[in-house]
Amino acid sequence: MMSISRSQVGAAAPTHMTAKRGERRGRRGSSPSRRRVDRAYYWMVVPAAVVFAVFLYVPFAQGIAYSFTNSQGYGDFSWIGLKNYTALFQDERVGHAYLFSFFIAIVITILVNVISMFLAVALNGRIFFRNGFRAIYFIPYTLSVLVIGYVFKYMFMTPIPAAGKALGIGWLSQSLLTSERYSWVPIVFLAVWQAVAYSVLIYLAGLQTIDAQIYEAAAIDGVNPWQNFWRITFPLIGPFFTINLVLSMKNALGTFDQVVALTDGGPNSSTETVTYLIWKGGLTGGEYAYQTANAVLFFLVLAIIAFIQLKFFGSREKV
């Protein structure tokens, strides 16, 4: 057997310990927490953060403060506490605006997601002129809502009632914009017509992430088209469905331009949404502080709805 003397061990130990210390120093030196950040990073980020805070958070905080006053948007004002918020829950006009906003938001969200998902699946398949159809479907999203709204207003006022009379359809023979019962239909139609384009793009992006071999394997197993969609496509685009649902619901609850262009809140205030009421009463009706409180309340409602949607549908996504 080979014997090792104590002197050899003593000579080897310091070398070994020195190597370990060097490794530790190297690991410490490469630690991300001690990495030096270039000053240019702060010069680019800090001004942008300050501008963002000044133009977003400062007005938001001021709006919350004004909601506790009796301000008309100008002149002197005094603090009145929670009186504006108490009055909101007793105002029938505000209650109707919230109910109407929720009603059309649910209808718009369902129609937008059903139509856009159908179009996305169709466009993702092997159809002729696929890229051209993508561009055509996206055109409505690029147009101004007010401009298109006035075009649709003319259509619902003249050509469509004429077509209803020719076809003998009673409820369509008069302008839907003047009917308290059906005046919501043009608003929903215009909102869906324009919102579908953006949702289609999101669903198309989700469909691109699915491996084609999955569909090939399903075809070998004899899966029919409905099972192909419900068991494969829909679960795999779950995250994109959640994003679309949250965005479409948020945009639908904020319906404003469509109301201004088509009905201006009428007839008889039947198509007033919350956003329209905040604008109308706050800027032209002398209810600045009151409608500011309404805006704060509406912000909380939107935040709660978005949180519930993300929590509920996010837990059911299959990745």
Image (tube, helix red, strand yellow):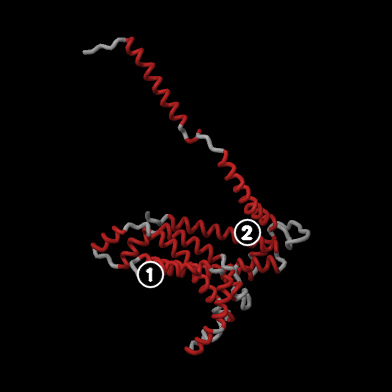
Q: Is residue 156 above or below residue 234?
A: below
Foreground residue, 51 or 110? 51
Would you say residue 110 is visible in this rendering?
Answer: no
Q: Residue at x 49, y 69 (%)?
A: 139
Identity, as a three-letter code, of the amino acid under mark 2: Val
Tag 1 residue: 129
Foreground residue, 65 or 129? 129
Q: Residue at x 57, y 74 (%)?
A: 149
> Percent position (x, y) of residue 279?
65, 66
Left or right: 169 with respect to 91? left
> Percent position (x, y) of residue 68?
70, 57
Tag 2 residue: 296
Q: Is residue 226 above or below residue 8?
A: below
First reached walking from the N terminus: tag 1 or tag 2: 1
In the rendered structure, are the residues bearing label 1 and label 2 in contact, judged by CB atoms less than 8 Å apart? no
Left or right: 173 with respect to 241? right
For the residue carrying disc 1, how many other residues have a C-alpha within 10 Å: few (<14), some (14-19), or many (20+)? few
**What SS does tag 1 mark?**
loop
The image quarter in which residue 241 lies = bottom left
Left or right: 228 with respect to 254? left
Q: Residue at x 50, y 86 (%)?
A: 164
Count of picture labels? 2
